[in-house]
Every structure is written in structure tokens, then in C-alpha cells.
Image (cartoon, grey):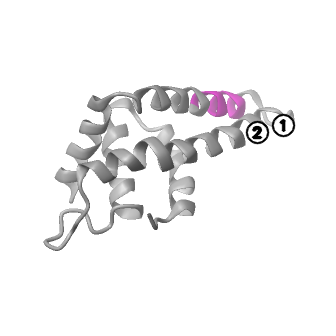
């Protein structure tokens, strides 16, 4: 699948810090703008199955890459306590997402918001 990996990595920082009630909406919007750009068009062949596959394969890999960057940032002792707290918050959110990726309900919610936003 061809998608804008750099765009996802860049925008993931702000999405990880978003409020809980807006997180899935922003995630659905991210996927619509950078992965499934032809979602819900008349000639679109993208199905829920494609979204689920992306979530458990490619998106999981992106999260792992981002977490590795954050773990490296934690080793940077030139950062102050507030910066370290933000990094720890992002790492915690990634762990929560990775656990949620196992659940069909999480996939369903993302697909629901993608349908609404498209």
C-alpha cells in the first residue's frame, strides 16, 4: 500500500497528545488524508478489511518506530522535566494504542469516524 509515511510520523506527535474524546476523530482524519485518500469515492475498492490490515501491520510498525524515537529522546538529559513528561505521555499513549489494535471495536470506531469525515 502506498501512503504518506512521513506525514503520518509528523502528525502523530500532536495526535498522541490530543484529548481522549478527540483522539479517534483525529486518527480517522489522519488516515483519510495520508493513507486512504480515495475512501468512499464511487470507484473506491478500499474496504474495512484494508483498514484493519493497515492498522495491525503498517500502523503498528509506525507506532513502534515512533516509540523507539521517544525512548531515545528520554535518554537526552539536556531536556527539562516537562519535556520528559510529554515524552513519557506519548510513550504511554502508544502502548495504549498498541493494546487497542488487538480489539475489533477499536477498528470499528476508526472506520466509523472515517466514514463520517469522508
Name the side, left or right, on which 81 lies relative to 61.
right
Residue depicted at 34% across the width and 28% down the height: 103
SS class, disc 2: helix
Q: Position of residue 3 (x, y in %)?
A: 46, 65
Name the side, left or right, on which 70 lies relative to 39.
right
Q: Position of residue 36 (x, y in %)?
A: 33, 62
SS class, disc 1: loop
Q: Quadrant of the C terminus?
A: bottom left
Residue 86 belongs to the span the image colors magenta: yes
> Relative to the observer, which residue lies in front, 82 or 71?
71
Label 2: few (<14), some or many (≥20) within 10 Å?
Answer: some
Q: Position of residue 56 (x, y in %)?
A: 44, 41
Residue 108 belongs to the span the image colors magenta: no
Residue depicted at 37% across the width and 38% down the height: 23
Is disc 2 in contact with disc 1, using a CB cutoff of under 8 Å? Answer: yes
| Disc number for residue 73 | 2
> Relative to the observer, which residue lies in front, 54 or 63?
54
How many numbered dots are placed on residues in this image?
2
> Relative to the observer, which residue lies in front, 11 or 32?
32
Q: Quadrant of the N terminus?
A: bottom left
Q: Which stretch is magenta? A: 82-89
Find the distance from the CA under tag 2 to the CA under tag 1: 5 Å
Q: Which residue is mark 1?
A: 76
Amino acid at each position: 500500500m502506498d501512503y504518506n509515511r512521513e506525514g503520518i510520523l509528523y502528525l502523530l506527535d500532536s495526535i498522541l497528545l490530543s484529548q481522549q474524546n478527540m483522539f479517534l476523530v483525529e486518527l480517522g482524519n489522519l488516515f483519510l488524508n495520508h493513507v486512504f485518500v480515495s475512501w468512499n469515492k464511487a470507484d473506491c475498492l478500499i474496504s474495512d478489511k484494508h483498514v484493519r490490515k493497515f492498522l495491525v501491520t503498517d500502523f503498528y510498525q509506525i507506532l513502534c518506530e515512533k516509540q523507539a524515537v521517544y525512548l531515545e529522546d528520554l535518554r537526552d538529559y539536556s531536556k527539562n522535566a516537562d519535556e520528559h513528561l510529554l515524552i513519557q505521555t506519548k510513550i504511554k499513549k502508544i502502548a495504549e494504542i498498541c493494546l487497542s489494535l488487538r480489539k475489533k471495536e477499536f477498528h470499528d470506531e476508526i472506520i466509523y469516524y472515517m466514514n463520517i469525515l469522508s
